[in-house]
Structures are given as C-alpha cells and as structure tokens.
Amino acid sequence: MTTELAQRLRLGEPGAFTQLLDEHGSMLYRVARHVTQHVQDAEDVVQECLVTAYARIDTLDDPSALTSWLRRMAINKALLRLRRRRREPIASFDDGDPLVAIGRAPLTAARAPLPEESVLRREAIRTLEAEVSRLPEGARLVYVLTEIEGLSYPETAALLELSQEAVRARLHRARTRLRDGLVDYFDDRRHPDRTDHDHPRSGIR
Amino acid sequence: MTTMTTTPPTWPAPVRRWDTAVGVLRMSLGSVFVIAGVKGVVPTLFGFTGRDDLVAKFTDPVTGFLAPWLVERVIGIGLTVDAMLLVLSVAEILMGLALMLGVTTRMIALGMAAMYVGFTVAAPVAGEIRLARDLTLMVLSIVVVLTGPGRWSLDRWIAARGTLPRLVADADLPAGARDRALLMIRLGLALPMLTSVAFTGGVFDNPFNTTLPLAGVAVLGLALVAGLLPQAATALTAVWMAGLVVLNLVTSGPFIGLDDGKREIAMLAAAVAYLLAGPDRWSLPRPRRIRCRETDALLVSYVDGTLGPADRDALEQHLLDCRECWHHVGTYRRTVALGRELQAQPMPAELYDRLERLIETPASHRRP
C-alpha cells in the first residue's frame, strides 16, 4: 500500500499528495507534537515534512520504506526545532492561550468525543498525555517512538543513537513515571479495570 | 513488538499447573479408595471365589490386612468380619468418588488420612512394607488437606456460588504452604523406597525392592529426601511407577492389576504432581525465586513477551504470592496498553484543513 503511494507520488499523480496527508499526516503530527511539545512547532514540522516528501520523493530508494522515511524525517525536523526552542527558552505567549503557547495543551483536546468509550478511560488518556509531556526528554523520545509509534528497540536505538539497553531502560523509566501519574485512575473504585481485586488468589469470587 | 491485551491473564501458567497437580493427586487418591471399595463389594471380579475367600484373605494372621485382635473385637461386638468389610468398602467407594469429584475435599482427605493410619495399625506382622506404602498414601492425603480441592473441583464450582464455607473450599494457598505440600510429596515418595531397601526377602518382598537394584532405589530415595535434583528424581519415580502399573495390568488383567498397582497409581500421580508444581523451596540446587526488588528489572521483557520461560514462571509465581507486585505489574501493563492507544490520536481538524488547502495551491506559490 505504501509502495503504491510512493510510486504515485513519484509520478506526481493527482490526489497522491492528499492521500499522503490522509494516511500519514496524523502520524507525522503525533511524532512532531510529542517530540517538540509545542503545537506551533508540530504543525510546522508536519507541513515541512509534506513539502519535503513532495520535493524529494526521488531520494527514497525503497518505496516500501515510505512510512519509516517519513517518520525519520519528522523526528529529525522535530528534534531540530526542539533544540532551537531550547536555546530561546522563554515561550512566546502570542497565541493568547498560554497553555497552547507553551505546548501543554493536550492532544486529545482536538478529538471528537467517542460515545462508546468510557468517560474514565478518556480521562485516563488525557492524564497520560499530560504525563507524557512532563517526561524528561530522553525518556519521552524513547517512549514516543517505541510505545506510541510502535518502533522496535533496534529502530529506536538507531534513530536516537542509543544502545538498545539504554532504549529499554528509558522506556521502563518512562512507563514507571507515567504509571505513577495514573495511580488515581487505576485505583478508581468505579473502574472495572482496577487491579487491586483481580489477584487469582483473592479467594473465591 | 508484540501486541498486548488490556487485561492481564487471570490464570498464569503456575496457577494452571498447580491446579492440575492438585487435581491429578486428588483423582488418583480417590481412585485408590474406589478400587479397594469395589474389591470389597464385588470380590469375584478381583479373583476371589466369593466373600468367604475375601474374609479369609483379609484375616490371614501372617499376610492379611486385619490383625487377629481386631477380628476378635469385631466379632465381640456382634458383627461379622464380612459385614464390617462391606460397610467399610461402601464407605471407601463413596469417599473415593467424593474426592475424585472434589466435593468436601478437605474433610474427605482428612478422613482418608485417618483411615490409612487405621489400616497400618490394623495390619499384622507383614505390616512393615504395607505400613510404609499406606503411610505414603496417608502423607499424600494430608497433602490434599493442605492444598484443598484446586480449581477443577465441585467444591470450587459450588463455592463460586457462595454456598460453602471457606474452611471447606479455600483456594488461598500461600507460597509457604505450597512448598510444604511439595516437600511432603517427595518425603512421602521416599518412605517406601527406603523401608523396602532396609527390609527385604520373604514377606518383605514388594515391587519396590524386587524390580530395580536396591542400591539404585536407595539412591533415589535419599535424593528425594535430600531434595537433590527433585525434578529428575520424581521423573524417574514417575517412570518407574508407570512401569509397575503397566506390568501389573499386563500380568494380572484389569481388575487384579489395578488392585495390585493402586498404591503405585497414587505414587505415580504424586510424582507427576511434583513435576508439574515443583521444585520446592528446600530442593537443591535452590530454585529461582524472585524477590520484590527483582521484579522491576524483568518488566520490560515480561510485557514484551520476550522473558525466558524460567524467569517468566518465577516472576508469575512471585506475582501470585505478592499482591504488591501483582498490583505493580498490573498497573504497569495497563499503562502500556493505554500508551498504545495514543497511537490512534488523529491530528487536529484545523491543521488538516490548512494542510489540505496548502496542497491545493499551485506548487510555485508554496512556501517551503
């Protein structure tokens, strides 16, 4: 499927670019958003990626690697912005909403509520989003790539120039911190998923 | 990366194996009673010419199971030995069936243990070997008293509906009790081996000292007592017992064969149960036991499904014994599952619209 899309982009077929946006736009935004922790930067990164993909599709040797090519592009561009932003650490508040300006607005804000999803679970996902943005950078990058984007440890290690052991250690650190942030959710007595009563030796139920 | 469900498996492998082990033990002990009971009710099936023949065999002063003093007492209170055997046999069948079904398991097993003591006391001079083997069955019955009925039992089925008191069907078995039950199994298996090596010839001859070299039996028995490589020792025991059972069936036919080999059936089951649920804490080399502070280091691999089977078993066993770690791992898993849901987050609609407009503008007007 991605092979086909890569071919269409290369041939400059009409509609191929819209297809690229539809199929990969959300992934690009997610990566950019989680890495930069900044709404404006993330949007710019997505735009840049689309433009670069359009202009440089010829440099993609293996058409089946389109997804990882785009992802790597998004990560690199996002990291560049993150580093640049860090050199000018005072956030601009020109967006009006300071939360948005400093990139703390949860991703889920833009998401239409799904009725079948329990309210608690949605809350938990929002809490998790907020906790992800509070992770230290090293742990956050690893977490975003492995857990959210589903990259393998070797892939993540190569992208971030880390050892696989370091990737695993950071992933574990990230999960542990996020878990601590979700404790209220897990201990919520209203929640059917809570873990304190499901021990197989909790007696006869 | 492996996909993962939101809820952890409720019955990890160690629980399943433990429940199977308990079930196997329970079924075999029940079947020993049923076989013995059927023999007492329908002796002709088992090669006896009739009830008189059965009574004569049981009351033989040298090889019979009933001591002369006991026979005198029975007759003294106005009963016949035949009637006593019949009542006893019917009781054995009922108790055996109850244990096999796993109903009021602990009570039945306790009763059986007491009866095995009675059998050994009632047995006359030939008792040494029978004493050891029936004492093994007593030990195994006590093991069932300790373990309770396990999952595959009527007790558990009834208790799930909340009508039996906890005493009767308590599923809760902490690590210490599990280790003690396993220790009792291997000591129980060693007992007839060691006594059969110590007493040989004449009335002492039995399958334990006539089928394998005595030195080998002694080594096996001592290994079981010391807990040296208990998995290997119980595996050998299981093979040996299975061989004896098959030998009995082949040489004596189904009924006599089953009756002659019924204790070996129980010991085979006990060895298999140990293989499934062992090794115990006191065995050598010391089995891997996970401590709370080791749990954390294994979590990434555990959640990925890449943890080796030995470590996974040890970890799951620890989780069963430690509610804190169970909770820790459970919330960790749920965090992972929630995190993977973030993947489904779409980009904001305004951004999509803006990018779509950008695409539609001619390339020459595009800002890079």
Image: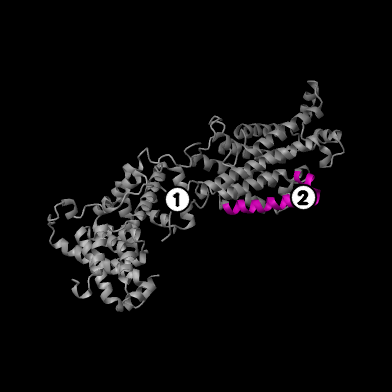
Q: Position of residue A176 (x, y in %)?
A: 32, 51
Q: Amino acid at mark 2?
A: Leu
Q: Is residue A188 magenta?
A: no
Q: Answer with left or right where residue A37 lies relative to residue B310.
A: left
Query: What residue range appears in magenta?
Result: B231-258
The answer to whether marks 2 and 1 mark residues whose Cβ atoms lie closer than 8 Å is no
Question: What is the chain letter for disc 2?
Answer: B
Q: Nearer the viewer, residue A142 or A69?
A: A69
Label 2 SS: helix
Residue A156 visible in rendering:
no
Question: What is the chain letter for disc 1?
Answer: B
Q: Quadrant of the C terminus of chain B?
A: bottom left
Q: Position of residue B282 (x, y in %)?
A: 51, 46
Q: Nearer the viewer, residue A173 or A182?
A: A182
| Helix, strand or loop for the magenta stretch, by majority | helix
Dot 2 or dot 1, earlier in sequence: 2
